Amino acid sequence: MVLFRRNGVGSSARLRALRSLYWSLIEQNGPEARARRLLRNFLSPDQRAQFDAEGYLEVTGSHTGRRYQIHQGTMSNVLELDEETQPKIGWCFVPERALAAGDVMLAQKIALATDEAAVLAFARRFSPRLPSLP
């Protein structure tokens, strides 16, 4: 336990430094940071480089061989790509309970890579293109 004297010289600076250290530790070890580290551990070196550079990772479906992009986020973040690697269909599927974004993305990656047909059977489709303005 650390004790601070209220009237000591520099005690407010030490208290601010301790508070800053506490919040940085919370930020580095919070659920989002742990989920992101876990996701990165399950990525291939190519996927990790792509994720770091582009903010998404590509996965090949287990049954059809289709390519999917999984973007950062927890819902409506999976895009099926056509032959020219353009978004063709968006897919929305998430775990039953709320999880950190990295955990959701890892679950989506594993689901598409191991049982694509079952996932797409209950996933919701959406248009990956934004509506054009007149």
Image: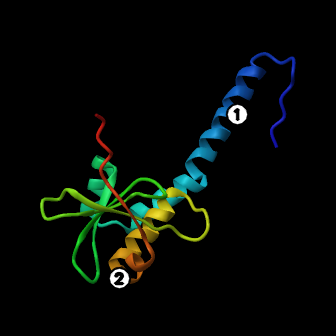
Q: Nearer the viewer, mark 1 or mark 2?
A: 2
Residue linked to disc 2:
117
Which secondary structure, mark 1? helix
Mark 1 / mark 2, whichever is N-terminal: 1
Residue 29 appears left or right of 22: left
Whether residue 122 is visible, yes or no, is yes
Note whether 22 is above or below 32 in the view shown: above
Badge 1: few (under 14), some or many (20 or more) residues near its Cα, within 10 Å?
few
Which of the pair 125/4 is nearer the observer?
125
In the picture, the quarter occupied by the N terminus is: top right
Residue linked to disc 1:
19
- Residue 21: x and y, percent? 64, 37
Q: Amino acid at mark 2?
A: Ala
Q: Are marks 1 and 2 in contact (CB under 8 Å)?
A: no
Which of the pair 34/117 is nearer the observer?
117
Q: Amino acid at mark 1?
A: Arg
